[in-house]
Amino acid sequence: MLEELFVSRVRVKILQLFLTAPQESLFHVREIVRRVSEEINAVRRELARMEKFGEVTSEWRANRRLYRFRKDYVYYKELLSLVAKSTGLGGNLIKNKNKLGKIKFAFVSTLFLKGVSSSQGDIDLLVVGSIVLPELQAIIADEQAKRESEINYSFMDEAEFKFRVKRRDPFILHVLIQPKVMLIGDEDELLEGVMV
């Protein structure tokens, strides 16, 4: 978990809040306190540190100081990946990996992680392998209920995946070139047959 990498439990919670919120979300200190269930002074202290190191930026609106995570922060993609693998849909897939069968690859779209609605043809989640479908559907249904929105996902066995890559299937090529966070498997191996 992130707490293994970061000493402050409060900072971990604030990172999870910022990085799982819809893109460009602004948060007031009291809203952050309510959402992370921590003391206001601890939250203020962490926000000050995060602003000092360039992770967040703040602005004043109507006598309220609002914070947002900086998308240009040097470690933004790495932190997004860490949060994706430890919380929400990604965290549940990794935690329940053994119940889900033999997964070769699983990834989530970066746009999905940023809270951007998927457009026609986009996939939020792709899972490749011998999958126990009821287990996967239960995890997805749980996440859909939490998000109150549908998750656009696809699954296939490894033979079908390789066949579709070899045939240069437009759907698979589109899914594979979209920005993503690998949850299970190696991205280089995933893209092996595509970049020929």
Image (cartoon, rainbow, N blue to C red):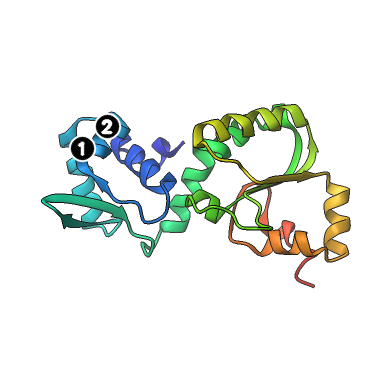
Label at residue 34: 2
Residue 113 x, y percent position in the rendering: 51, 49
Q: Is residue 116 above or below residue 43?
A: below
In the rendered structure, which amino acid carries the disc numbered 2? Arg
Q: Is residue 166 above or below residue 89?
A: below
Q: Nearer the viewer, residue 114 or 130?
A: 114
Residue 131 x, y percent position in the rendering: 78, 35
- Using the rendered view, name the quadrant where residue 9 is placed: top left
Q: What quarter of the picture does the C terminus occupy?
A: bottom right
Q: Nearer the viewer, residue 47 or 153?
A: 153
- Using the rendered view, name the quadrant where residue 155 is placed: top right
In the rendered structure, which amino acid carries the disc numbered 1? Arg
Look at the numbered disc 2 and give the secondary structure of its residue: helix
Q: Which residue is tagged 1?
A: 30
Look at the numbered disc 1 and give the secondary structure of its residue: helix
Q: Hey, which residue is sitting farthest left in the picture?
A: 63
Residue 62 x, y percent position in the rendering: 13, 53
> Dot 1: few (<14), some (14–19), or many (≥20) neighbours within 10 Å?
some
- Using the rendered view, name the quadrant where residue 95 is placed: top right
Label at residue 43: none
Task: Give the tally of numbered discs.
Answer: 2
- Give the left or right position of residue 158, taking residue 90 as reference: right
Residue at x 79% of width, y 42% of height: 129
- Give the left or right position of residue 194, taking residue 112 as reference: right
Q: Nearer the viewer, residue 185 or 21?
A: 21
Question: From mark 2 to mark 1, how far is it between C-alphas?
Answer: 6 Å
Mark 2 touching mark 1, by CB under 8 A? yes
- Give the left or right position of residue 188, taking residue 165 as reference: left
- Give the left or right position of residue 152, taking residue 63 as reference: right
Residue at x 69% of width, y 31% of height: 137
